Image (cartoon, grey):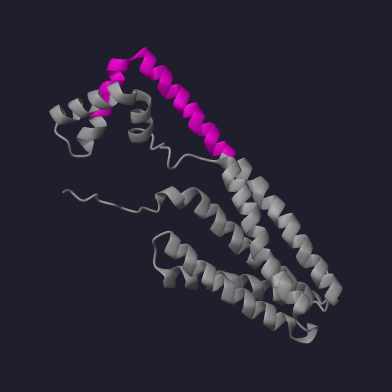
Amino acid sequence: MARRHLEIHVTRRIGWLRAAVLGANDGVVSTASLIVGVAAAHGSHQAILTAGFASLVAGAMSMAAGEYVSVSSQADTEKAEMEVERRELEADSAGELRELANIYVKRGLTPALAHDVAVQLTEHNALDAHLRDELGISETMKARPLQAAVTSAITYASGAALPLIVTALAPQQAMIWIVTIASLAVLTALGAMAARAGGAGMLLGAVRVLFWGAFAMAVTAGIGKLFGAVV
């Protein structure tokens, strides 16, 4: 009895994974950096909390809007390419068949086999074959603006909530160090988990996120110290 060959690939997760990682990392880094900067400028506990909460709300909305606009532009481009390809198939189906066969020849098939494959795929779904093999547009990789926007907003708010909660609970005299350490620990974990979910090395993902998170907080704290006032 033949056994089923099961493979698990991460490409199906690329759309939401990218938005989720970007949103969570930005939430932690942006909010923690702002909190550290305001604290370094000797802001009051209430001012620091207000700044952190404003960062959570404004950042989540900005991430959602930015992702939606960006991914919508990608989706519009894909739709335009689909329409162009549909018209070309209607106008010159024989030429499009040769074009598809040439693609398979370049990938290593013999001309005869490439022609047979192109014919069969064209008979099955010509537009899908050209979108996938000529333009690289597939259902798995297709742009999904609403999914990206919602994912980014939720994950940004979730990431931003952590330094905000720590700020609310931490004593002001030790706030900078507590928020920094807690945020960097979460960033390290996020980097490792994102790398794991994407099928990459966890150590590299963790170190990469940790470095840039620490850099952002250090720069913001330095600016706060330099000006010595809440801005």
**Where's residue 38, x and y in %?**
78, 73
The image position of residue 97, as x and y in percent, is 27, 22
Frontmost residue, 36 versus 182: 182
Query: In the figure, 102 relative to 15: above or below?
Result: above
- Residue 127, can we see it? yes
Q: Is residue 173 left or right of residue 163?
A: right
Per the picture, the main secondary structure of the magenta-coloured stretch is: helix
Q: Residue furthest top?
A: 91
Question: Residue 156: x percent and y percent?
Answer: 64, 59
Q: Quadrant of residue 212?
A: bottom right
Left or right of 146 in this view: 52: right
What residue do we see at 54% from left, 59% from top?
21
Q: Is residue 199 above or below residue 102?
A: below
Q: Is residue 192 left or right of residue 129?
A: right
Q: Is residue 177 left or right of residue 75?
A: right
In the rendered image, the quadrant that contains the C terminus is bottom right
Q: Is residue 111 magenta?
A: no
Q: Give the residue at x 71% y 51%.
A: 61
In depth, the one of 158 and 42 nearer the eye is 158
Residue 186, given in percent of the width and then of the height, sits at: 58, 72
Is residue 226 among the parts visible in the rendering?
no
Residue drawn 33% across the image and 30% down it? 129
In the rendered image, the residue lying farthest to the front is 1
Residue furthest bottom in the image: 173
Is the residue 81 above or below the residue 146 in the image?
A: above
Is residue 76 a member of the stretch shown in magenta?
Answer: yes
149 or 87: which is nearer to us? 149
Mark count: 0
The stretch of residues the image draws in magenta is: 72-101
Residue occupying the point 21% across, 51% down: 3
